Amino acid sequence: MPEPHDPLRSLFQEAASTGQSRARCAPVVLVARRGERLRRRRIAALAAGACLVFAGTGAAAAVLLPGSPNTGVPAVTPSPSRPSPAPKPVPTTPRSTSSVTSTPVPGRTEPGTPPATAPPRTGRGAPGASATATHGTSPPSTAPPR
């Protein structure tokens, strides 16, 4: 049970009575602005929700409807119309194994190691193959430009 002579209680009652005497209603313009702002926020939230529902329904319909394009790989790989020529093997030279040296000789490589420089590639095919042999087309014309 509260004490009747509590100093804190009497101060709160005094502050409450002062606040009630000075309290006024908010101006109508201020209340109208708050109402309009709240209405705009609700309409924006409703429009955003409707857009999300519409987009989700459209995406689900596009995925689930029959007749949509299939993105899978065909079961059978199509055969090429013209067989491509096999790449020509690069001729190899026999190496002699008569002398074993511990110092490398310039221009020579040990067996099983790649050469220092590879032959230049002139097309898409094997090294040394021409682009016309790979693609099966005629060589370009040598007519002078106009």
Image (spheres, helix red, strand yellow):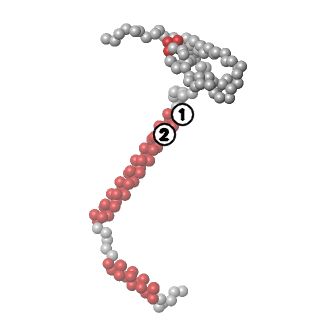
- Tell me if residue 82 comes above or below residue 45 in the rendering: above
Between 60 and 76, the residue placed more toward the observer is 76
Q: Position of residue 16 (x, y in %)?
A: 39, 80
Q: Earlier in the sequence, mark 2 or mark 1?
A: 2
**Which residue appears at 50% of the width and 18% of the height?**
122
In terms of secondary structure, where does tag 1 sit? Answer: helix
Evaluate if marks 2 and 1 touch, with contact meaning CB atoms under 8 Å apart. Answer: no
Q: Which residue is mark 1?
A: 64
User: What amino acid is found at the position of numbered circle 1 in the picture?
Assistant: Leu
- Quarter of the picture containing the C terminus is top left
Between 55 and 82, the residue placed more toward the observer is 82
Disc number placed over residue 57 in the picture, else none: 2
Determine which quarter of the picture holds residue 71: top right
In this rendering, position of residue 91 left or right of residue 67: right
**Which residue appears at 50% of the width and 35% of the height?**
61
Between 26 and 69, the residue placed more toward the observer is 69
Q: Position of residue 123 (x, y in %)?
A: 51, 18
Q: Is residue 75 visible?
A: no
